[in-house]
């Protein structure tokens, strides 16, 4: 009997796949790095076939080489960055590169248009969140208005994870978490598409251009003969609907109960707070959860891990690529809290929540002739920490309960950064023993869709490793600097808007 589970995640800068047994032991893994295209300021794109599908097919072939084959795989689940926008023609071929999630801010004018045509309050009441750079409806309007030749050929509008499931199964299905961001085309009460406010977005096209919606652990379809030939999977292997990467990451560390908050330290920082009932607020996103009936409060910062990458690439060229991060983090640990008087706004590609400002930009305040590169890198890490605190305090201001914080992602492997964030937020962060990421959560979803696992089995898959406790001696300083952080944004906002 096939008893192995395959999970794959396509992230912003890399893709990862894991092959596990039913107990959650990772038998094999593979990672492929890739890039992002920034055609102009505010635009972020990736090629659906040359990046997304190429990575997935290569990873599957690699994992199924040697000791394992497609006959061993009981189920498959995939996740990817999102929500993205990818138009397909009638044959399912991409018509242009995929437009990425909230880091792509091109549709700010279309947000204003839709708010004017439908009503800002109407959209919020209907969708349980406001239009922001994370919303896909405004990007669909941008595509329709700016690329009419592409729009004329468009037969399907999909997102990255759904496109990958389509390449495996031939079926168009979208998870409800990402469908929630296709606002105002999604109706949260019925958890399905609605044509009520579709005309300003879709124009002459109907809801048939949208995939079917489903929960993350439901069946999207089965591996086709074509996909089997390209990957080595067995024809008929079940494929889950899957998820956006952050949601699979939350599953991977057991963030599935109300009050659980995941903080995902990746190229961006993403937050998922599990809720029993929705608590809409225009500063954050109210979306569908992974499993039937669940809601999530979600939030996201635009540039966090990508900001440390920028710092290493542009300001640390004298350091070897292999050692740059280790040296920078080690040096930052030796800089006192407060970064020797430096304060940074980490808004290098606008900011998502809670500001929802595509025109925000990075600011460094307090520079002097005694400032060092080490001070500046410490200020980067602290700036991200203040942004994380801003989001968590927003959740609490809304009256929601944050009972447990779990840190995941590549940045969670860096004790220095985790300690800085716990000190700034004033709360403990739980670090799981395994921080493999979204691919591991997808392996669990593969177990569910194949019938080999039940949701209660997640308790045996996920174990805590350590707890990062805040250093209370730094609380007064960080409380003061957090207030200055918010003031720095409000007092430089108009100048930065003109510069951007």
Image (tube, helix red, strand yellow):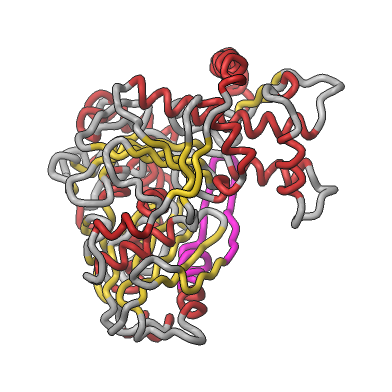
Left/right of residue 51 with respect to residue 334 in the rendered view: left
In the displayed structure, would residue 477 be above or below residue 81?
A: above
- Magenta segment: does it hold 33? yes
Q: Residue at x 19, y 40 (%)?
A: 188
Left/right of residue 374 with respect to residue 100 in the rendered view: right
Name the quadrant of the C terminus: top right
Name the quadrant of the N terminus: bottom left
Q: Work out whether residue 320 or residue 407 is closer to the camera in this orientation and state it.
A: 407
Give the tally of numbered discs.
Answer: 0
Q: Please state the horizontal and vertical placement of residue 30, each as a whole percent of the image.
A: 54, 70
In the displayed structure, would residue 77 be above or below residue 126?
A: below
Which portion, as a residue range, is magenta? 32-56
Among the 4 quarters of the image, the one containing residue 338: top right
- Magenta segment: does it hold 128? no
Residue 406 visible at all: yes
Q: Residue at x 44, y 31 (%)?
A: 353
Q: Please state the horizontal and vertical placement of residue 199, each as a whole percent of the image.
A: 22, 42
Q: Work out whether residue 37 or residue 451 is closer to the camera in this orientation and state it.
A: 451
Q: Work out whether residue 342 or residue 355 is closer to the camera in this orientation and state it.
A: 342
Q: Work out whether residue 399 or residue 452 is closer to the camera in this orientation and state it.
A: 452
Q: Please state the horizontal and vertical placement of residue 198, each as a whole percent of the image.
A: 22, 42
Q: Please state the horizontal and vertical placement of residue 379, each as a whole percent of the image.
A: 68, 29
Left/right of residue 458 with respect to residue 43 in the rendered view: left
């Amino acid at each position: 009997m096939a008893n192995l589970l395959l999970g794959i995640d396509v992230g912003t800068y890399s893709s990862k796949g894991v092959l596990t047994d039913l107990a959650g032991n990772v038998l094999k893994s593979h990672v492929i790095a890739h890039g992002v295209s920034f055609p102009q300021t505010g635009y972020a794109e990736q090629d659906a076939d040359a990046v997304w599908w190429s990575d997935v097919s290569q990873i599957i072939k690699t994992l199924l080489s040697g000791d394992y084959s497609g006959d061993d795989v009981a189920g498959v689940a995939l996740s990817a960055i999102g929500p993205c926008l990818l138009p397909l023609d009638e044959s399912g071929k991409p018509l242009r590169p995929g437009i990425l999630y909230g880091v792509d801010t091109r549709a700010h004018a279309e947000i204003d248009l839709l708010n004017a045509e439908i009503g800002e309050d109407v959209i919020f009441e209907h969708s349980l969140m406001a239009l922001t750079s994370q919303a896909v409806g405004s990007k669909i309007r941008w595509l329709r208005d700016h690329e009419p030749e592409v729009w004329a050929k468009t037969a399907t509008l999909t997102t990255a994870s759904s496109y990958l499931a389509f390449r495996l199964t031939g079926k168009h299905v979208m998870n409800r978490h990402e469908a929630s961001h296709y606002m105002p085309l999604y109706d949260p009460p019925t958890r399905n598409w609605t044509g009520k406010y579709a005309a300003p977005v879709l124009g002459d096209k109907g809801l048939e251009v949208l995939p079917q919606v489903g929960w993350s652990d439901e069946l999207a379809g089965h591996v086709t003969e074509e996909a089997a030939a390209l990957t080595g999977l067995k024809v008929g292997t079940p494929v889950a609907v899957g998820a956006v990467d952050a949601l699979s990451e939350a599953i991977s560390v057991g963030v599935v109960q109300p009050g659980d908050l995941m903080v995902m330290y990746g190229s961006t920082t993403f937050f998922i707070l599990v809720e029993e009932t929705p608590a809409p607020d225009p500063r954050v996103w109210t979306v569908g959860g992974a499993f039937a009936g669940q809601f999530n409060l979600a939030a996201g910062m635009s540039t966090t891990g990508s900001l440390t990458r920028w710092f290493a690439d542009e300001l640390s060229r004298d350091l070897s690529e292999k050692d740059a991060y280790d040296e920078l983090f080690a040096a930052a640990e030796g800089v006192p809290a407060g970064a020797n008087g430096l304060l940074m706004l980490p808004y290098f590609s606008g900011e998502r929540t809670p500001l929802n400002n595509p025109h925000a930009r990075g600011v460094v305040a307090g520079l002097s002739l005694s400032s060092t590169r080490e001070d500046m890198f410490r200020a980067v890490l602290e700036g991200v920490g203040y942004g994380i605190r801003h989001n968590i305090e927003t959740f609490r201001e809304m009256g929601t309960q944050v009972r447990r914080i779990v840190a995941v992602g590549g940045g969670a492997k860096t004790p220095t950064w985790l300690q800085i964030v716990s000190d700034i937020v004033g709360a403990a962060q739980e670090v799981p023993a395994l921080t493999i990421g979204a691919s591991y959560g997808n392996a669990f979803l593969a177990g569910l869709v194949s019938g080999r696992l039940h949701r209660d089995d997640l308790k045996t898959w996920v174990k805590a490793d350590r707890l990062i406790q805040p250093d209370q001696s730094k609380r007064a300083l960080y409380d003061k600097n957090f207030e200055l952080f918010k003031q720095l944004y409000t007092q430089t906002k108009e100048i930065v808007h003109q510069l951007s």
